[in-house]
């Protein structure tokens, strides 16, 4: 990224962090993914049980490797050769984890977190259960408002995820969402959650990373 782009995103991040504080959500800016990992690791108490939401951001950032080395109990959904039943069990355990780490599909300039899930397990843990939720988001996740967040998900996030998951959905076939032709069980846009505020101050922390991460 150019110097101007970095500065531009840093300014936007500062504005979002102020908005998050009003919403009882802690916001921190990390200029790089390495700094983001350092900040996240610092937030995890020794021996904590840590759950992970399905997230290309979390994978791409290198955080999973760091968590595997840490003094903590990782509910590691990225281990190879897990059965469907084991993954399902980990999703349930996430709800009782001490710390839950995920990304967000979009974050608005006013600090709302916008997400759509297929099953709902990821947003469930963001909403309720773990005593701490850490969200990592690259600057590519910033949108103007909630409507733009949902549009971002239907035009970029869900089509990319459908391709990654080999889903037979209209967006995977054409690159464009077609709600009316998109049917269960292939469809992954089923449950929408918009987090406007956190009830317990600081339960949720957003680390805004000054570079694009995930999609
Ligand atoms: S509703 Fe269906 S077609 Fe549209 S983005 Fe979601 S999965 Fe793709």
Image: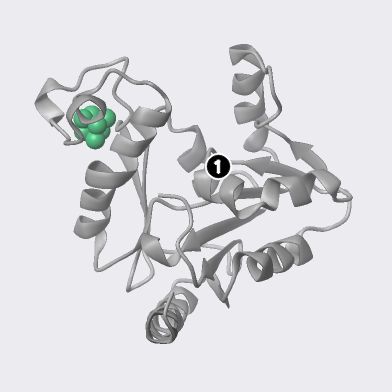
Q: Disc 1 on helix, strand or loop? A: helix
Q: Position of residue 25 (x, y in %)?
A: 52, 69
Q: Nearer the viewer, residue 69 or 47?
A: 69
Callout 1: few (<14), some (14-19), or many (20+) C-alpha neighbours within 10 Å? many
* Residue 85: x %, y % from top left: 62, 13
Q: Looking at the image, can residue 142 be seen?
A: yes
Looking at this view, name the residue that lies furthest to the front.
2
The answer to which quarter of the image holds residue 134 is bottom right
Picture layout, residue 206 above or below residue 195? below
Which quadrant of the figure has residue 106? bottom left
Q: Residue furthest left?
A: 180
Whole-percent x, y for residue 129 in the image: 61, 43
Q: Inspect this view and state whether residue 198 appears.
A: no
Q: x%, y% of residue 66?
A: 77, 51
Q: Looking at the picture, does residue 136 appear above or below residue 91? A: below
Residue 39, above or below 101: below
Q: Residue at x 50, y 33 (%)?
A: 121
152 to the left or right of 203: left
Horizontal side of 46 relative to 57 (left or right) equals right
Per the image, the residue denoted by label 1 is 125
Residue at horizontal 24 percent and vertical 22 percent from the top: 169
Quadrant where the N terminus sits is: bottom left
Residue in view at x 76 percent, y 61 percent: 41
Closer to the camera, 53 or 60? 60
């Amino acid at each position: 990224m150019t110097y101007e782009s970095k500065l531009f995103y840093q300014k936007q991040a500062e504005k979002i962090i102020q908005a998050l504080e009003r919403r009882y959500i802690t916001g921190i800016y990390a200029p790089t993914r390495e700094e983001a990992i350092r900040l996240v690791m610092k937030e995890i108490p020794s021996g904590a049980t840590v759950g992970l939401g399905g997230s290309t951001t979390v994978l791409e950032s290198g955080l999973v490797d760091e968590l595997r080395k840490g003094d903590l109990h990782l509910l590691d959904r990225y281990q190879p050769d897990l059965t469907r039943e084991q993954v399902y069990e980990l999703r349930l355990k996430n709800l009782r984890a001490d710390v839950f780490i995920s990304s967000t599909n979009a974050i608005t300039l006013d600090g709302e977190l916008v997400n759509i899930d297929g099953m709902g397990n990821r947003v469930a843990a963001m909403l309720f259960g773990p005593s701490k939720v850490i969200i990592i988001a690259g600057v590519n996740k910033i949108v103007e408002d909630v409507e733009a967040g949902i549009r971002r998900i239907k035009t970029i996030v869900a089509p990319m995820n459908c391709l990654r998951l080999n889903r037979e959905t209209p967006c995977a076939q054409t690159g464009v969402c077609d709600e009316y032709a998109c049917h269960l069980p292939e469809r992954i846009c089923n449950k929408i959650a918009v987090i406007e505020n956190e009830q317990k101050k600081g339960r949720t922390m957003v680390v805004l990373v000054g570079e694009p991460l995930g999609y």
